[in-house]
Amino acid sequence: MIGARTKERASGTFPDYPLASEGTGHIMRSAFFGGRARNGRPVHLKELNTLVVLETLRGRGAISRADVARETGISAPTVSKIVERLLDARLVLEEGTGASNGGKRPTLLHFNARFGHVLGIDLGGTHLRVAVARLDGTILDQTMEEIDQSSGPDAILSRITEVGMRALAAQSSSRAIAVTLATPGIVDVDRGVVVGARNLKGWKDVPVRRALADRFESPVTIDNDVNLAAVGERWHGAGRGHDNVVFVSVGTGIGSGIIIAGQVHRGAHFAAGEINSLPSGLRQDDGADIGLEDVASGPAIIRRAHALGVVLPHGATADAVFTLACAGEVTAAAVIAEAVHALAGGIAALLAIADPCVVVIGGGVSRQGEALLAPLRERLAKMVPLRARVLRSELGVDAQLHGAVFAALRLADQSLMALGRSAGT
């Protein structure tokens, strides 16, 4: 139980709090305002009011109780009760007084972003990236380490824990309020299970959330890395200010993350956005369709260029093919045109179904910028009414990490609200 405001709590330590229940680890802020959580439990008005007040304080500098009431539309007495609980929990601190409007000078409040930390983690085929953030979303530090994807789930999960705990210790913290992992493959978000990941050996039906929750002793949520890249771009990147965003990753593979009305759309089997196997428009000698990923991904571009006799240095990437194409090498230009045509077909399908405001192109191939985007836009305009803006990722390789931090903050909200409810009782 949380009692009176004590100096110890100002240090950022916090008491035990309940782990997120099964099936709720994926709920983000917008779900609270949707009236009903995905698992069917009604969202209580008290929780909504607490969250609204908490977010108002988190999004502002110093602010008075009266200003919180005016901005949120919540009655002043209700705001005062919520604020008192948040003060008792040390989630909010008092900070001086504001200007008088003719009466007593109001006491100013500010959100205690240093109350604790969240971890955002991006697991790739060859690397592990970890970010530590304050509760206002400020990323304090991030690190990257190489991993052996063939070492198996247990070894990699242990490495994730080791690197994550080391990152927390560097911020003088022993425990995260929440942790989110971005991982390749099909992710059953409700169960917290990686159903399968082609780039990670042995990752089939791995109960990642439970394993990491036991190791970190914190609430954990996991999601597909491209989904979280879409979330990251909407939060801090090219999708800022838009509720309908599609992120398309074009790198060693091809995939997409879809955000509709502010929420990630995952589909009935958590496979929404898996456009890699869509027909590319090309066929093999036996008449079978060639999938999009086998034409437009980075490795596919290299393979096609080699097959057609384009001379490339050893270890060259798709960048080299783009460079030759821009310099007028005819065969290289044909390879790129083929890849752009196939990619445009996949994105056209997304545009027709999701009707986003923005399509963000990320992944290694997106480094080409307008050399890729200009012909892509031109081709798309010939296929479908192009109402969406097609933009390059602003976050680059950090998109997944930013998305993981955002999801961890939303997961942390549940624990913060629990603290706010119990404070002073």
Image (cartoon, rainbow, N blue to C red):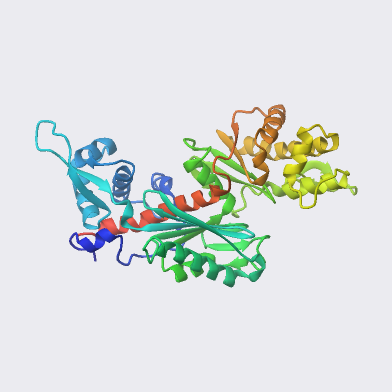
Residue 308 as seen in the image, left or right of residue 165: right
- The quadrant in which the N terminus is found is bottom left
Q: Residue at x 80, y 52 (%)?
A: 314
Q: How many marks?
A: 0
Q: Relative to 100, is 371 on the left or the right?
A: right
- Residue 274: image location, x then y, percent: 65, 49
Going 83% across and 35% down the picture, which residue do you hit? 329
Q: How far from the left and from the top, in percent, is residue 203?
A: 63, 66
Q: Is residue 377 visible?
A: yes
Q: Position of residue 206 (x, y in %)?
A: 58, 67
Looking at the image, residue 382 lies above or below residue 234: above
Depth check: give the residue in front, 143 or 187: 143
Where is residue 280 drawn, in percent x and y?
A: 77, 42
362 up-or-down from 416: above or below: above
Work out which quarter of the rendered image holds the C terminus and state it. bottom left
Of 195 and 300, nearer the camera is 300
**Residue 370 falls left or right of residue 290:** left
| Quadrant in which residue 170 is drawn | bottom left
Locate residue 251 relative to residue 69 in the image: left or right. right
Residue at far front of view: 313
Residue found farthest to the right: 285
Question: Which residue lies at the image location 41% right of the left edge and 47% below the top edge?
Answer: 29
Q: At 59% across and 42% down in the image, what residue appears?
A: 247
Q: In this view of the protein, can residue 38 be seen by the observer?
A: no
Q: Front-most of 48 and 257? A: 257
| Position of 154 relative to 286 (above/below) | below
